[in-house]
Amino acid sequence: MNEKEQLEAARDRVIENIAKNMHLYGISDSIGRMYGMLYFKNQPMTLDEMKEELGMSKTSMSTSVRTLMDLKMVEKVWRKGERKDLYKAEEDWHQTFVDQFTIRWRPSISMNKAAMEKSKKELQNMIINENTPEEIKKQALDDIQKLTNALDYYDWLNRLVTFFETGEIFEYIKKENQTKE
């Protein structure tokens, strides 16, 4: 095997493993392969170039690129004289992790907190209602305590997500290239 083949084999191995692990970000192997291919390219690519490289349909390419852009793993770039859209991979994997973590958790936190707060308020109204049987009031009090604990967790999780979003996390857990400065 010559050096060019060794280079391609090394890249292919990494790309295949990236693809296998993309389920952690909630995306398919084929989209993972696209990201891996773009990661190793030293220049932005058009959909046609990606289609040729990966053998996927243009529609599939377009959908995959849109997914990666939504996840902030790929960005559209401009090059003078180029009429077609060009795309390149986000190369900062720390930022990719932060984006994925915050994109996935922020809506879940909001949705769960809203449901719990609504339920807690309904249970509190049930407790003050004179017609509610004592046994139901007791169960409602237990549930309110559980919801209070869960809401405390979501407040903590919200602060954690903010900690990632602001980049403050990197003050405590340095990126490798930051520790060598």
Image (spheres, rainbow, N blue to C red):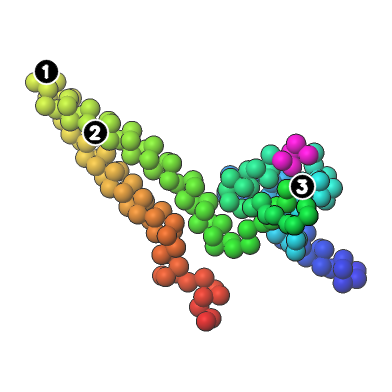
Q: Nearer the viewer, mark 3 or mark 2?
A: 3
Question: Quick one: label 3 or label 2, which is nearer the N terminus?
Answer: 3
Task: For label 1, count other residues whose C-alpha is less than 10 Å away and answer few (under 14), some (14-19) or many (20+).
Answer: few
Residue 154 in the image: state x and y as whole percent: 33, 46
Reading the chain from its start, which is encountered first: label 2 or label 1? 2
Picture coordinates of residue 127 (x, y %)?
Answer: 14, 27
Q: Earlier in the sequence, mark 1 or mark 3?
A: 3
Quarter location, residue 130: top left
Residue 84 is labelled as 3
What secondary structure is found at the residue carrying circle 1? Answer: loop
Which residue is nearer to you in this view: 131 or 38? 38
Query: In the displayed structure, does residue 110 sit left or right of residue 74?
Result: left
Q: Which mark is residue 120?
A: 2
Residue drawn at x 63%, y 47% is 68
Residue at 56% x, 75% y is 177
Residue 95: name its quadrant. bottom right
Residue type, numbered disc 3: Lys
Q: Measured along the vertical axis of the image, is residue 178 above or below residue 26? A: below
Q: Amino acid at mark 1?
A: Asn
Residue 59 lies in the magenta-colored region: yes
Towards the viewer: 106 or 85: 85
Q: Is residue 102 left or right of residue 32?
A: left
Q: Where are the magenta residues, as a range? A: 58-62
- Say which amino acid is labelled 2: Lys
The part of the image, by quadrant, that contains residue 112 is top left
Q: Is residue 16 above or below residue 5?
A: above
Determine which of the numbered discs, if any, sits on residue 119 in the image.
Answer: none
